[in-house]
Image: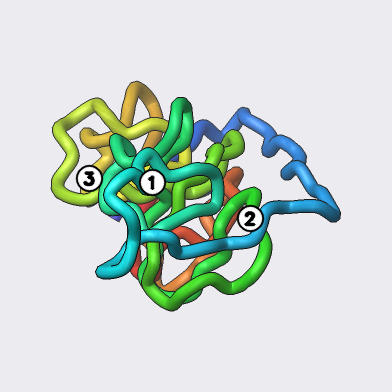
């Protein structure tokens, strides 16, 4: 568990305020373009396209947004395919999951999965959560039972 002196922070600093999430009526729809029948030149994947396994499979500054089940995908419309991962332009303070065990002092605000405060940069703390518990100062569902 994180240090109780930092209980208002969740892989975040207590004195930061959240930013407003961008909204749009014309968000691109989630689309899985990979698979057995996909052409070999499908990579790199564009915004809201999947199923990616790593960020290097995405165009330019997009990242591979990992999902556990049917979590919402930032900047994209629709439910997508259960468990599929999509390339996205990640907004500030949106929960983001990195697979594996992070080295100490590498996770930034709203990034996970952390187990101890030392894995977070500077004065950030690891917010231990259950299921899809809200992480202070962060947006999105993140991955179920993942700590940020």
Q: Secondary structure at mark 1?
A: strand
- The nearer-to-camera label among 1 and 3 is 1
Give the Cα distance between marks 1 and 2. 13 Å
Give the Cα distance between marks 3 and 2. 32 Å
Q: Position of residue 5 (x, y in %)?
A: 43, 41
The answer to whether residue 118 is visible is yes
Q: Is residue 42 left or right of residue 136?
A: left
Q: Secondary structure at mark 2?
A: loop
Task: Count neighbours of disc 1 (C-alpha within 10 A) and say few if under 14, some if 14 to 19, many if 20 or more.
Answer: many
The disc label shown at residue 9, or none: none
Residue 56 sits above or below residue 148 on the image: above
- Quadrant of res 60: top left
Lower position in the chain sequence, tag 3 or tag 2: 2
Write down the residue under mark 3: 116
Give the Cα distance between marks 1 and 3. 24 Å
Which image quadrant: the N terminus?
Answer: bottom left
The disc label shown at residue 64, or none: 1
Q: Position of residue 38 (x, y in %)?
A: 34, 61
Write down the residue under mark 2: 76
Q: Position of residue 133 (x, y in %)?
A: 50, 67
Lower position in the chain sequence, tag 1 or tag 3: 1
Task: Count neighbours of disc 3 (C-alpha within 10 A) and say few if under 14, some if 14 to 19, many if 20 or more.
Answer: some
Its colouring scheme is rainbow
């Amino acid at each position: 568990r994180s240090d109780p002196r930092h209980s208002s922070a969740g892989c975040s600093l207590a004195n930061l305020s959240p930013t407003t999430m961008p909204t749009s009526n014309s968000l691109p729809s989630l689309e899985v373009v990979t698979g057995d029948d996909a052409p070999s030149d499908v990579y790199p994947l564009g915004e809201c396209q999947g199923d990616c396994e790593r960020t290097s499979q995405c165009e330019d500054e997009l990242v591979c947004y990992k999902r556990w089940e049917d979590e919402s995908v930032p900047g994209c419309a629709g439910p997508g395919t259960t468990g599929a991962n999509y390339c996205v332009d990640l907004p500030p303070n949106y929960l983001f999951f990195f697979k594996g065990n992070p080295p100490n002092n590498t996770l930034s605000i709203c990034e996970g999965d952390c187990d101890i405060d030392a894995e977070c940069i500077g004065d950030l703390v690891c917010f231990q959560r259950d299921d899809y518990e809200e992480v202070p100062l962060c947006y999105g569902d993140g991955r179920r039972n993942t700590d940020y």
